Structure formats: C-alpha cells, structure tokens
Image (cartoon, rainbow, N blue to C red):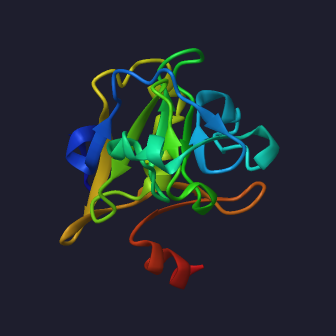
C-alpha cells in the first residue's frame, strides 16, 4: 500500500471562511445556523432543534459560499479552535457563522469521514500536521479512504478501498 501526503486544498472543492458576519437577525424558524457551540466533543453536531438558531433565507442568500451540504466539514476557528464535525443530512442547506471554516471535500478524491478522523487525530490536533497535508493512498483512478475504521466497540480494521468495497467486505 502506497501512502502519499497531499495538501488539504488538493482534496477539496473549497475551503472557505468569510471575513464578516454581523448584524444578523435571528428568527423563530428558518435556515439553521451552525456555530462552534453546536460541535460536540465527539465531533458530531447537536441535533436538538431547541439549541439551534435560525436565519431567514434572505440573510442566508447573502452568504452563498457558506451554505452547507451533507458531507461538508465545519471547523471552529474562534473560541475553542479546532473542533471539527461532518455536516449531517439534518443540516443540508444550513449556513454557518464566521467562527467556522467550511471544508467541502471532493468526494471523488477523499472520503469526508476519513478527512474528519484525520483532522481529529492527536497528531493533527497537536499541530504536527501544521501544513494541512493529508495522508491518502492510491486505489486505481482516484484517491480513496485508507484508515483504521472503527467497526465495533473493540474492533478495528485497516482497509484501502471505496465505501462500496468496504460494505461488500463486511
């Protein structure tokens, strides 16, 4: 198995954080807004709507590059820096605050859950991967997931292959 390190930007469609986000009017129901406080310590997002804030579609449309899709990653860059979560289907179409960075992986090159695991790794968190270079392996025509995947309470498996290949091998 051959591993190669590539810059994060080479694996993403876009990595983006807009510089300002102020005077936002919040409404009772509308477009969910993801903020750093919604990223839990386990790297998931709080899904209880009572903890969400909402903005209007008009406000959201002012910030089109921060509209999230399922599988994007969000990373806190203010407050508790470095918390990372994968955007679940519940937040499809949500927007995010300026305290977050939007990382939109190119899923033909890298699995978003692998990238999420890497960005939550002790080596990355400790700053040893300060140049944002991600180790991946080559699997034919495209880059694919290569990682220790947690499959049970005490099991791990190391595999290199597409998600479909992993499912077929399970």
The residue under the point 58% across, 14% down is: 79
Whether residue 70 sits left or right of residue 90 in the image: it is: left
Residue 167 vs residue 70, the one in the foreground: 70
Residue 34: image quadrant is: top right
Whether residue 157 sits left or right of residue 163 in the image: it is: right
Q: How many numbered callouts?
A: 0
The answer to whether residue 51 is above or below residue 98 is: below
The residue under the point 44% across, 79% down is: 165
Q: Is residue 87 visible?
A: yes
The answer to whether residue 87 is above or below residue 124 is: below
Residue 57 % position (x, y): 49, 50
- Which image quadrant: the C terminus? bottom right
Residue 86 vs residue 113, the one in the foreground: 86
The residue under the point 45% across, 27% down is: 124
Residue 135: image quadrant is: top left
Residue 24 % position (x, y): 53, 28
Q: Which residue of the protein is positioned furthest toward the top in this rendering?
A: 79
- Which image quadrant: the N terminus? bottom left
Q: Is residue 39 visible?
A: no
The residue under the point 28% across, 39% down is: 8
Residue 161 % position (x, y): 39, 70
Residue 7 % position (x, y): 22, 37
Whether residue 152 sits left or right of residue 167 in the image: it is: right
């Amino acid at each position: 198995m051959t591993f190669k390190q590539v810059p994060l930007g080479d694996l993403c469609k876009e990595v983006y954080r807009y510089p300002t986000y102020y005077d936002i009017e919040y409404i009772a129901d509308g477009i969910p807004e993801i903020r750093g406080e919604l990223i839990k310590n386990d790297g998931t997002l709080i899904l209880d709507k009572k903890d969400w804030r909402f903005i209007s579609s008009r406000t959201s449309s002012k910030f089109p590059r921060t509209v999230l899709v399922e599988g994007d990653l969000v990373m806190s860059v203010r407050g508790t820096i470095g918390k990372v979560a994968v955007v679940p289907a519940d937040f499809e179409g949500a927007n995010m605050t300026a305290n977050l960075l939007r990382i939109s992986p190119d899923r033909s090159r890298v699995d978003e859950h692998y990238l999420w695991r890497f960005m939550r790794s002790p080596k990355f968190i400790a700053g040893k991967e300060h140049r944002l270079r991600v180790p991946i392996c080559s699997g034919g025509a495209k880059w694919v997931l290569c990682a220790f995947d947690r499959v049970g309470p005490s099991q791990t498996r190391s595999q290199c292959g597409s998600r479909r290949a992993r499912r077929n091998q399970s």
